[in-house]
Image (cartoon, helix red, strand yellow):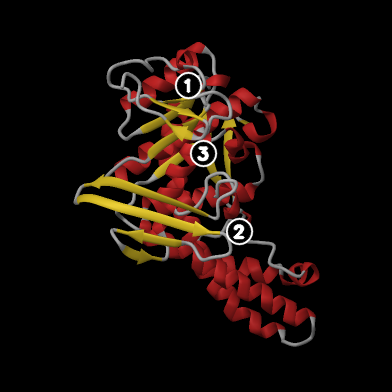
Amino acid sequence: MVTGANGAGKTNLLEGLYFACTGRSCRTSNEREVIRFGAGTTRTELSCQGEDGLHELTVGFSAGQPKVMRADGASVERLLDLGTRPLVSVFLPDRLELIKGAPAVRRAHLDQFVAALWPARTTTRRLYGQALAQRNALIARIRAGRAGRDSLESWDAQLAHHGLALMNDRRTAAELIDEPFERLGQELGLHSRPSVSYRPRSKATEPDELSAELAERVELDLERGFTGHGPHRDDLATTHDGHDLRAYGSQGQQRLALLALLLAEREAIAAHRPAAPMMLLDDVMSELDRDRRQALVDLLRSSPGQSVITTTDLEHVPGATDADVTHLAVAGGRLLAMAGE
């Protein structure tokens, strides 16, 4: 439990934890923003206990310089590829875009969930992206008269091959969280049949079928200048009583759906990986009523894994002062001693 006044640095603490676990910010894509005002460098150091012992992760970043990441003293290119790093799931107020924002946000999140479930499948999305970029580049050359249409066939086959693998991964991942999303959503207060489902753009079940769909749309692709059909147009839909929460959900329902989604994913990951993700929940209680605060705390207590909750007022968090809860305080951007010390 982390407490502090507004602007004290609670969100920065969660961001630092996320940065140390993943090598990137949970708040911004501009990494210059993770550096403290007036400083030229930021650095995080994380000690984590795994099944095989203690591990040390460090991330250092200076403006204009490459990011330096190390695991147990050895340089690594990506922390996300490490099996020894803690998995982490984060709730921030602006993450409501995952429910009410554009499909691209949900696609990226779904692919991250797939990677957390099955690390060996992380290359599927990358290979599809590479094939898509090559096909789009070829379309540009055809439009410019520098290539013939017959050369599209081989790229259609590659795109279809990787696309079907990507679709299957996404579909399986979405199916894993459908039941827990409904159950957890109802426990949090979404009583009328909450549901999450994968919505692929293609109806293909075999690579040849997706390749044929691409071939049927060549004229339209040449007119637009890019590939307009395929898994890069998929979506992950959340509904409540059969209605799309993105369009028809209230702000409160969207917030509960986001919590249910993150908790459902945590449950699925815990069943497939050695440890459940650490939950980082920033200012989550301020927008919930008393019953839903209690329901959320009960769900966090009954599930495996660590949870870090920030709040301006301990009274907003049921059980915050219990003996088994570690309490930290933040003021002026600094972490103070634990309560009682």
Of the residues shown, which amino acid type is indicated by label 2? His
Q: Where does the image place residue 332, in percent across and percent down from the top left?
A: 52, 31
Furthest-front residue in view? 38
- Under circle 2, the secondary element is helix
Q: Earlier in the sequence, mark 1 or mark 2?
A: 1
**Viewer-side residue, 30 vs 60:** 60
Within 10 Å of the Cα at label 2, are there few (<14), some (14-19), or many (20+) other Cα atoms?
many
Q: Where does the image place residue 70, in percent across and percent down from the top left?
A: 36, 60
Q: Which residue is mark 2?
A: 232
Residue at 50% across, 12% down: 290
User: From what the image shows, is residue 65 above or below residue 240?
Assistant: below
User: From what the image shows, is residue 328 above or below residue 107?
Assistant: above
- Under circle 1, the secondary element is helix
In this view, the mark in front (2 or 3): 3
Q: Which mark is residue 290?
A: none
Q: Earlier in the sequence, mark 1 or mark 3?
A: 3
User: From what the image shows, is residue 124 above or below residue 341?
Assistant: below
Q: Which residue is mark 3?
A: 12
Of the residues shown, which amino acid type is indicated by label 1? Leu
